[in-house]
Amino acid sequence: HHSNSHTTRDKHQSRKENNNINMLSRIATAAAVRRAPTLLSSASRTMVTLEESPEASEAWKKSCYYTIDFTISEDDVVKEAVKRFSAYNIGALVTTNAAGEISGVISERDYINKVALLGRKSDELKIKEISTKAAKLVTATPKDAVDVCMNKMLQKDIRHLPLLDDDGKVVGMLSVKDLVKELLAEKEKTIQTLSDFALGKGGTVEYS
């Protein structure tokens, strides 16, 4: 008889605990539901989409081309460009004409395919003899989204993209590496936002 009342008390205790757990989970669910729309809007803001992708200008500021003069006269000999590739550890330069306007791009590929492999002399050939001319150039603007730039590169199988302003003047140069770095940084931000939320930090989630 004694142990029986004990069992009743245990049952009562566990029912009470269950009720508490249920109540807590209901509160937690309600809180999560209230926060969910904010999470989604915050996440979609950081997700890399065509509208939300960082601009080319962001990648440009971090590019190795940002701190150097990435233009060279098309009338210089090819060897000058090759020296610059080596000194700055870069793969392409924008070529300019006598008026200082963009006339094309010269890349390491141009040198390898049109000079080295053909046994021509880089100190005799002019850059304009082997460069890719402006008419065939694929370019972008600083306001273009990074993934738009990436698509241009992939479609044309190129690794460098000159940035032109509204007047067609060269204001920058991007390599495929610059774009990849920028996209990865953006993805990292999204992952951080979501993991902070999942861990209840709500760090970068804004409550409306």
Image: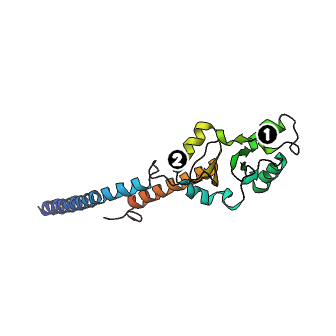
Could you say which disc has been placed on residue 147 in the image? 2
User: Label 1 belongs to which residue?
Assistant: 129
153 up-or-down from 22: above or below:
above
The spot of residue 7 in percent (x, y) is: 16, 60
Q: Quadrant of the C terminus?
A: bottom left
Quadrant housing residue 42: bottom left
Which of the two marks, 2 or 1, is nearer to us in this view?
1
Residue at point 79%, 56% (across, down): 87
Residue 153 in the image: state x and y as whole percent: 60, 42
Picture disc at residue 182: none
- 22 relative position to 71: left or right: left
Q: Secondary structure at mark 2?
A: helix
In the image, 53: left or right of 61? left
| Mark 2 surroundings within 10 Å by alpha-carbon count, few (fewer than 14), some (14 through 19), many (20 or more) | many
> What residue do we see at 41% from left, 55% from top?
45
- Image quadrant where one finds the N terminus: bottom left
